[in-house]
Image: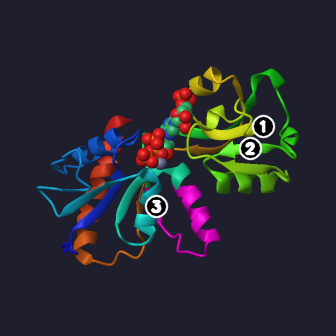
Amino acid sequence: MSDNNRLRIAIQKSGRLSKDCQDLLKQLGVKLNLREQRLIAHATNMPIDVLRVRDDDIPGLVMDGVCDLGIVGENVLVESQAERQAQKLNANVTKLAKLDFGYCRLALAWPQELGQQPLSWFEGKKIATTYPEILKQFLKAQGINASTVLLSGSVEVAPRAGLADAICDLVSTGATLEANGLLQGETILESNACLIQNPAMDNPQKQALLDTLLPRLKAVRQAKE
Ligand code: PRT
Ligand code: ZN
């Protein structure tokens, strides 16, 4: 059985946020023995367990109280909150800090050969995305009727493959859009990695540990400015 007094932190196992998360924990003084295949890494110098999972699972693990803290992109957090609200599930988390890595934007894009288009062009169109809830909320707010096609990968090939008229996907440098002959349009969401907490965490020992970590996080961020 796990020790209930150990602070549980969920981070991405392997992907764009993994290295930055591991570096951040190191800067906070958390010593980890990370073995590649392990789901849980126990800190050797403080009562902290790090769970290494798919980024999509992190918001739910924190909302359900399986983990006390998590580091995840705001894009994944916002989508998962909207999804859970639609299912009438608890979607509460406290955002403790916006972190200085993982920046990207969720943007609309369409085939370059169509040239610049106003938002009204999307009326009646089919848009492929991994973020259907964020996209639906945006379309609703703009008064546009368009349908969404859920793709969990290779979204950028959807128009060429005849699966959709346009896409709504994460962009950082823009190189992927360009390589796929797509023109970047409206940004729907700007995102960074963020540190989230289960608001129902009521263990005094865990809280005391968190109270020592947060000032260190602040100091790490100030040192980088
Ligand atoms: O396996 P797991 O589910 O954990 O990982 P994943 O494949 O879902 O996510 P991963 O590792 O690709 O990204 C994790 C998080 O990093 C995302 O949720 C974002 O918060 C953040 N992030 C930052 C990005 C990007 N930048 C990014 N550029 N996530 C994805 N991309 C992809 C984008 O989808 C597109 O395919 O990179 C491509 C575009 O990049 P550019 O530079 O060509 O514009
Ligand atoms: Zn993922």
Q: Is residue 115 visible?
A: no
Q: Give the spatial CA distance, label 2 vs label 3.
A: 25 Å
Q: Earlier in the sequence, mark 2 or mark 1?
A: 2
The percent coordinates of residue 188 (x first, y second) are: 68, 45
Residue that badge 3 annotates: 59
Q: Is residue 79 left or right of residue 16?
A: right
Q: Is residue 63 or residue 112 the one in the foreground?
A: 112
The quadrant the N terminus occupies is bottom left
Ligand 1 contact, mark 1 (Cβ < 8 Å): no
Q: Is residue 93 magenta?
A: yes
- Element under label 3? helix
Q: Is residue 148 left or right of residue 65?
A: right
Q: Is residue 119 left or right of residue 50?
A: right
- Rendered image quadrant of residue 127: top right
- Element under label 2? strand
- Element under label 1? loop
Judge whether 43 appears above or below 35 on screen.
Answer: below
Judge whether 25 appears above or below 69 on screen.
Answer: above
Judge whether 33 appears above or below 49 on screen.
Answer: above
The quadrant the C terminus occupies is top left
Q: Is residue 41 left or right of residue 153?
A: left
Q: How is the image coloured?
A: rainbow
Residue that badge 2 annotates: 127
Q: Earlier in the sequence, mark 2 or mark 3?
A: 3
Q: Earlier in the sequence, mark 1 or mark 3?
A: 3
Q: For mark 1, does the 10 Å Cα neighbourhood hold few (<14), some (14 to 19), or many (20 or more) residues?
A: some
Say what amino acid the circle numbered 1 marks: Asp
Per the rendered image, the range of residues in magenta is 77-96
Q: Which mark is residue 165?
A: 1
Q: Is residue 110 visible?
A: yes
**In front of the other: label 2 or label 3?**
2
The percent coordinates of residue 189 (x first, y second) are: 63, 46
